[in-house]
Image (tube, helix red, strand yellow):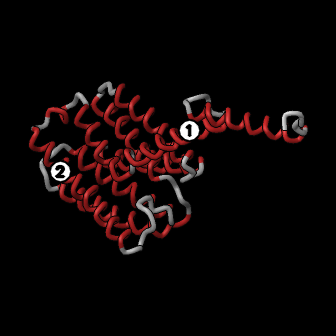
Amino acid sequence: MRGESIPAEDREEEKEVTMDQGVNELQGNGGISPPEKRTDGKNHTVKRVAELLSVAFHPIFMPLYGLLIIYSSHTLHSFMPAEIKRMIFILVTANNVMIPLALATVLYARGAISTFNARDRNERMILLTFSVVMYSITAFLLLRMQIPSLFRAYFISIAIVTLITLVITVFYRISLHASGIGGLLVLIVFMILLYNNSMVWQMVAVLVTGGAVMASRIHLQDHSPSEVWTGLLAGVATMSISLFLLLS
């Protein structure tokens, strides 16, 4: 009836419903979301970028990036015949990318590994053991080719680095991404020292990309900071010793 007044409790409930509806309408019509919503969106974007970096610079692709660094240097290696460059690139792609990916796919389908990242220690040891074999085959084939010694030394060193990381993995889980970044850094340093050649943009590219990749491994919680830095140091130390012994 018109003469009756609305109780105070009902008025408060109506006010709360009206406020909630207003917030929902603002969010539905492109209004400003609460700070929590914006933070979640930003975190999701950062996570996606970290995942893309981890895939694009997976250890399995590091030898190819090493070849591109050698090909892009202003040394005699960059003036090699295109046919030889292509042959080496195809050999490495087949032996050290396609075949390992095929093996990982088969192991995943059979349930031998739970993810392609091989987070479990036993899974990592299986894939690392196979990688050592394939890198050794690549190095053996390169030894039989008439190519500059840097290519042979580089892939022999990669096989040794992979073997060392396999041994370390028995006791401690290091970052293979960081180990691969360390190997690329050492390759550039050796090329600068051997050929007295400026490779500034290659060095900057590896440093910036490597830092982003290492940060992504920590952000995704796939590795702790100590595991990332241990992987980097292992890659740098092993690659340095190997290249020094093979090229000196």
| Amino acid type, mark 1 | Gly
| Amino acid type, mark 2 | Ile
91 or 147, which lies in front?
Answer: 91
Q: For residue 240, say whether it is visible.
A: no
At numbered mark 1, what does the secondary structure look like: helix, strand or loop?
A: helix
Work out whether 210 lies above or below 142: above
Label 1 with label 2: CB-CB less than 8 Å = no
Q: Residue at x 60, y 40 (%)?
A: 40
95 or 160, which lies in front?
Answer: 95
Q: Nearer the viewer, mark 1 or mark 2?
A: 1
Which residue lies under the disc numbered 1?
Answer: 41
- Say whether residue 207 is left or right of residue 222: left
Snapshot quadrant of residue 11 = top right
189 or 85, which lies in front?
Answer: 85
Mark 1 crowdedness (10 Å alpha carbons): few <14, some 14-19, many ≥20 = few
Mark 2 crowdedness (10 Å alpha carbons): few <14, some 14-19, many ≥20 = some
Q: Where does the image place residue 121, in percent across and percent down from the top left?
A: 50, 66
Work out whether 134 lies above or below 175: below
At numbered mark 2, what does the secondary structure look like: helix, strand or loop?
A: helix
Q: Where does the image place residue 16, in percent across and percent down from the top left?
A: 78, 38
Work out whether 188 lies above or below 141: above
Q: Where does the image place residue 222, in percent across and percent down from the top left?
A: 54, 53
Which residue lies under the disc numbered 2?
Answer: 90
